[in-house]
Amino acid sequence: MAEQNDKAASPATLMDVAAKAGVSIATASRVLNGSTRKVRNDSYVKVMEAAKKLNYRPNAYAQAVAKGTAPNIVLLVSDISDPYFASVSQGVVKAAGEQGISVTIGVAAGPKEELEAVRKATATRPRGIIISESEYVDAPERAALEAELRQYEAAGGRAVFILNRNLPFPAVDVANEVGARAIAKLVVDSGYTRPAILKGDDNHRSSRERLAGVMDVLGKAGIAVDPAAIANGRFSRTEGYAAVMQMARTGLLTAGDHAAYDGAGVDVIIALNDVMGIGAMTALRANGIEPGKDVGVTGFGDIPYSADVHPSLTTVHLPLAEMGQAAVDCVMADRDESESATPANRLIFVQSAPDIVLRESLPRR
């Protein structure tokens, strides 16, 4: 029968157990919280007997810290206000909550900030770090980021990327190029022949893959994209808006002497993510051009707002919440089973054939 603790109103503490066993608090913690550090057998027995007599209940957080990992996940995103990252974050938070794990969300806009955020995160020794950020595949910080995450995993943590960066860690990935081919085919089949393309930075992985897929389909359809009609919208709504405004100011969009395609102008804008597409539609309207009527518009991602804007945005559906769920599942998976089954840099594909969502912004010509 468990002894009555002297502090009847509160449960026994680690200090109580250590005092009763006649050992240090550090030794009691190692025994009760599952530390990998060895404890002499006689001390182990004393602590376990004292804990039983006092009806001591270990603290889950203390157990995790003693084992080298706190019971939380750190999620790093580029921009929490971006609906893409907000949707992924919701998936992470929901999946982690279902397993009793809290999530700390950090924001880092670029590779330098990302590396610093990872260093701060690893210092807290979380259960896992999920990185859904910049995707800059040739950033100078890449080697340092890999080294930091390798050290973190060697200490018992788990790092997972959302979208692959070809680093030796698990990555939740989607079929970017397949989706881009599908949306480009829809554009061609719908009768459009003079596209403007809003892309991201050249060293941004998703932009590269999506642009490659779009250009391949257009090329095979005999459509030579006017170089003047390709602009960097930096995967941002404001930059997508600015890029289309600049096209309008220089006369590229509508038929005339300075228009793209030998004066014929643009008949569709293919944006490689949804927020650029939404920004593009705002810029078109600001110049008296009706999106979905005068010029078709497509996006990529199917963020929640894409169905609510007017006209509703034709886009490629990505399972954003499911991507977050898959990342959490990878963090929580049994390490021995997952590592014996697949290599460390495995890809967790959550979508192999993206769905195209046809809406009002791309009527048939």
Image (spheres, grey):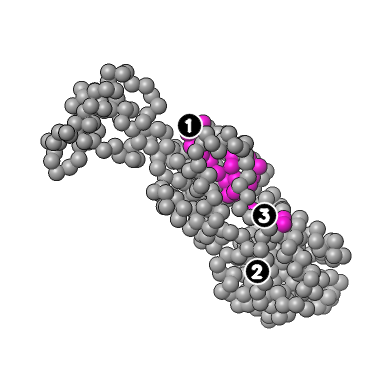
Range drawn in magenta: 153-178
Q: Quadrant of residue 291?
A: bottom right
Nearer-N-terminus badge (2/3): 3
* Residue type at tag 3: Ser
Residue at x 67% of width, y 51% of height? 204
Q: Secondary structure beneath disc 3? A: loop
Residue at x 75% of width, y 77% of height? 364
Query: Which quadrant holds the C terminus?
Result: bottom right
Circle 2 or circle 1, nearest the eye: 2
Q: Nearer the viewer, residue 86 or 5?
A: 5
Q: Is residue 307 magenta?
A: no
Q: Quadrant of residue 201?
A: bottom right
Write down the residue under mark 2: 357
* Residue type at tag 1: Ala
Q: Is residue 171 magenta?
A: yes
* Residue type at tag 2: Val
Write down the residue under mark 3: 352
Residue at x 72% of width, y 77% of height? 363
